[in-house]
Amino acid sequence: MFDFFKKSFISSGLFEGFTDVHCHMLPGVDDGIQKMESAVRALNYYEEKGASRVFFTPHIMESLHENTYEKLNERFEALKKEYKGCLKLALGAEYMMDEGLSRKIDNKEPLICASGNMVLIETLAHHPPLNFTQNLFEVRSIGYDVMLAHPERYAYMEKDNYKELLNKGIKFQLNLMSLFGLYGKDAQERATWMLKDGLYTFVGTDLHRLKVHRDFFHIKGLKSKQVDALAKLIENNNNLKIGK
């Protein structure tokens, strides 16, 4: 049966009360928003559209070795002084699964988590890291909950791989714009069936530029069943507490 009443993220009302668990709005620290005024503008847009909380998740990887907690927190505090709105903000990070993360785990360095012990981890899109699943389980074994960022973008993963990770307690975070084709047709198709099959636990925007995402927020591509499924993920987002 055709769905003649497809909606956008905005028109669906899903932005109301939304907690974004994955974005790159912290200015000037990675490939996301660069200027303080642009970050404030993005936060004001979120507030205007009804969002409630934003978890900043700047990249931490070998090529960004200067992204220490001290530097990121300094930038976070500076942004909080500039932003005058009512959104609740939290500092997290998006860790690339690379040698840098392995060293942190081996050295028992604390990881940056916006909520409790929930750590956001990503890998490269086309090449799995060595000992991928083993390393994810190791992060869990030292007391962290793992939120795997945008698994629909990992072309090397098959359905059995997803199920194995889910059975071991790894939680999947959908990139909202994957459903609208921002990351290509393959990621869109994966996101569509993964959402339908109930594989996701959380949803984030992975916003890097407000202009790009703002346009996608208004694309009317969501079917009614997808709206219902996203509402459940957003409820999970909203149930995450801020801080330890």
Image (cartoon, grey):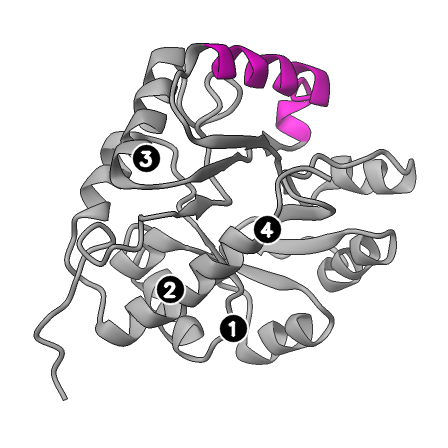
Of marks 4 and 2, the one in the foreground? 4
Q: Is residue 233 above or below residue 214?
A: below
In the foreground, 211 or 201: 201
- What amino acid is labelled 2 in the image? Leu
Q: Amino acid at mark 4?
A: Leu
* Quadrant, the N terminus: bottom left
Give the x, y percent position of residue 50.
30, 41
For mark 1, what is the residue?
199
Give the mark nearest the N terminus, 4 or 1.
1
Q: Which residue is mark 4?
A: 240
Circles 4 and 2, Cβ within 8 Å, touching? The answer is no
The residue indicated by pointer 3 is 46
Can you tell which of label 4 and label 1 is closer to the viewer?
Answer: 4
State how far apart marks 4 and 2 are (Cα): 16 Å
The amino acid sitting under disc 1 is: Leu
On the picture, is 199 further left or further right than 186?
right
Q: Do the CB atoms of the residues marked 4 and 1 lie less than 8 Å apart?
A: no
* Residue visible at 32% across and 52% down in the picture: 177
